[in-house]
Image (tube, helix red, strand yellow):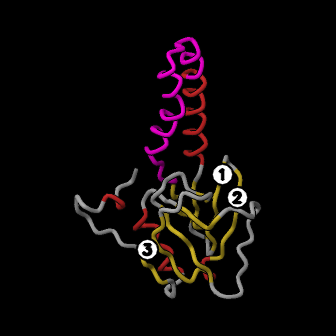
């Protein structure tokens, strides 16, 4: 059986989020507190990056395996995927980017995931190759991913 591994895309938008958390401390003017929070924020940012880079997706046989921190987080039979579409939903998913793919399943398939609040959202780094591989395994998948380019289409940028 062939195995293809796709790392997750990591969004740069998370860096400003960390900065916004610590900017009010700088405005208050307590520089000692700012230094402490900067160190904690820096360590947190490094840990988040390590966690995000540990996410990956593997296509092994006829299954899509999602890995998180070195262990299998979920298994999705590729034959049960009905369609894939673009999503910018910031809600919890198996993605470290806001430019995501939302999986829709065939009727009768229950999204059996350890975290009940987790949506079937993924963000592979080489998205087109990933979609083509899924389409080879299951030609019935409807792919509704728009990747038009242009300066006015800021939602297509990978933050």
Using the image, tell me which numbered label, if any, was put on residue 42. Answer: none
Find residue 92 and report its horizontal and vertical position in percent.
Answer: 62, 57
Q: Residue 94 appears in which quarter of the rendering?
A: bottom right
Outermost top residue: 32
Question: Is 113 on the left-hand or right-hand side of 46?
Answer: right
Residue at 40%, 50% (x, y): give it. 159
User: Predominant secondary structure in magenta?
Assistant: helix
Task: Look at the numbered discs 2 and 1 and tell me whether their residues touch, using CB distance below 8 Å.
Answer: yes
Could you tell me which secondary element the residue under label 1 belongs to? strand
Could you tell me which secondary element the residue under label 3 belongs to? helix
Residue at 71%, 52% (x, y): give it. 71
Instruction: Check disc 2 and report the residue beneath it.
Output: 73
Instruction: Check disc 3 and report the residue beneath it.
Output: 132
Q: Residue 53 appears in which quarter of the rendering?
A: top right
Q: Nearer the viewer, mark 3 or mark 2?
A: 2
Q: For the residues marked 2 and 1, what is the alpha-carbon distance in whole angstroms?
A: 6 Å
Could you tell me which secondary element the residue under label 2 belongs to? strand
Query: Is disc 3 surrounded by few (<14), some (14 to 19) or many (20+) residues within 10 Å?
Result: few
Q: Which residues are magenta?
A: 8-37
Q: Earlier in the sequence, mark 2 or mark 1?
A: 1
Residue at 63%, 82% (x, y): give it. 80
Residue at 39%, 54% (x, y): give it. 158
Instruction: Check disc 1 and report the residue beneath it.
Output: 68
């Amino acid at each position: 059986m062939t195995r293809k591994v796709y790392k997750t895309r990591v969004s740069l938008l998370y860096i400003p989020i960390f900065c916004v958390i610590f900017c009010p401390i700088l405005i208050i003017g307590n520089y000692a507190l700012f230094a402490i929070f900067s160190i904690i924020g820096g360590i947190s940012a490094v840990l988040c990056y390590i966690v995000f880079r540990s996410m990956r997706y593997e296509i092994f046989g006829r299954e899509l395996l999602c890995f998180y921190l070195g262990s299998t987080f979920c298994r999705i039979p590729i034959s049960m995927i009905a369609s894939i579409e673009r999503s910018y939903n910031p809600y919890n998913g198996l993605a470290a980017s806001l430019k995501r793919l939302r999986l829709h399943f065939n009727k009768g398939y229950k999204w059996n995931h350890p975290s009940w609040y987790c949506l079937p959202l993924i963000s592979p780094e080489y998205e087109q190759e990933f979609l083509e591989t899924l389409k080879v395994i299951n030609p019935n998948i409807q792919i509704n991913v728009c990747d038009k380019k242009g300066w006015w289409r800021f939602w297509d940028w990978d933050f």
